[in-house]
Image (tube, helix red, strand yellow):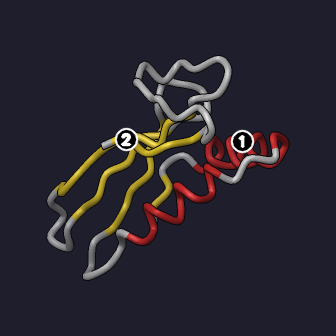
């Protein structure tokens, strides 16, 4: 995984640990599982606190899919709908 926002990710991971929540780490594991056959996930900054954008790229550099790794805690500034309030972080495509 190529991280384009290391400081923001560290802050989110620290906040996740402080809350005792594992959903951020589970989402990161899921994104990493998509990295096969030369595909690469890139993680980017998002405007919402503790949230990220991501892109899945083919070996030739084409964008295959993009989405968000969004924080749905309090306050939820992700501007995305979720019915799952158990997992604070969730992937959206």
Question: Label 1 to label 2, Cα distance in Å?
Answer: 21 Å
> Where does the image place residue 55, in percent across and percent down from the top left?
31, 51
Residue drawn at point x = 58 percent, y = 59 percent: 26
Judged by depth in the image, the label closer to the viewer, 1 or 2, is 2
Q: Is residue 46 left or right of residue 60?
A: right
- Give the residue at x 53% y 58%: 28
Characterize the local packing of mark 2: few (<14), some (14-19) or many (20 or more) Cα atoms within 10 angstroms.
some
Return the residue found at the far right.
18
Q: Which residue is mark 1?
A: 11
Residues at discs 1 and 2 in contact (Cβ within 8 Å) = no
Residue at the disc numbered 2: 92
Label 1 residue SS:
helix
The N terminus, quarter of image: bottom left
| Residue 37 to residue 78: above or below | below
Label of residue 44 in the image: none
Is tag 1's residue or tag 2's residue first in the polypeptide sequence? 1
Q: Give the quarter of the image for residue 44.
A: top left
Label 1 crowd bin: few (<14), some (14–19), many (20+), radius 10 Å: few
Q: Secondary structure at mark 2?
A: strand
């Amino acid at each position: 995984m190529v991280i384009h926002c290391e400081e923001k990710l560290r802050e989110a991971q620290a906040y996740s640990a402080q809350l005792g929540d594992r959903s951020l780490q589970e989402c990161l594991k899921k994104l990493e599982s998509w990295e096969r056959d030369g595909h690469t996930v890139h993680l980017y900054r998002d405007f919402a606190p503790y949230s990220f954008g991501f892109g899945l790229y083919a070996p030739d550099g084409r964008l295959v899919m993009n989405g968000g790794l969004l924080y749905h805690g309090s306050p939820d500034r992700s501007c995305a709908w979720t019915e799952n309030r158990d997992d604070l972080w969730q992937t959206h495509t």
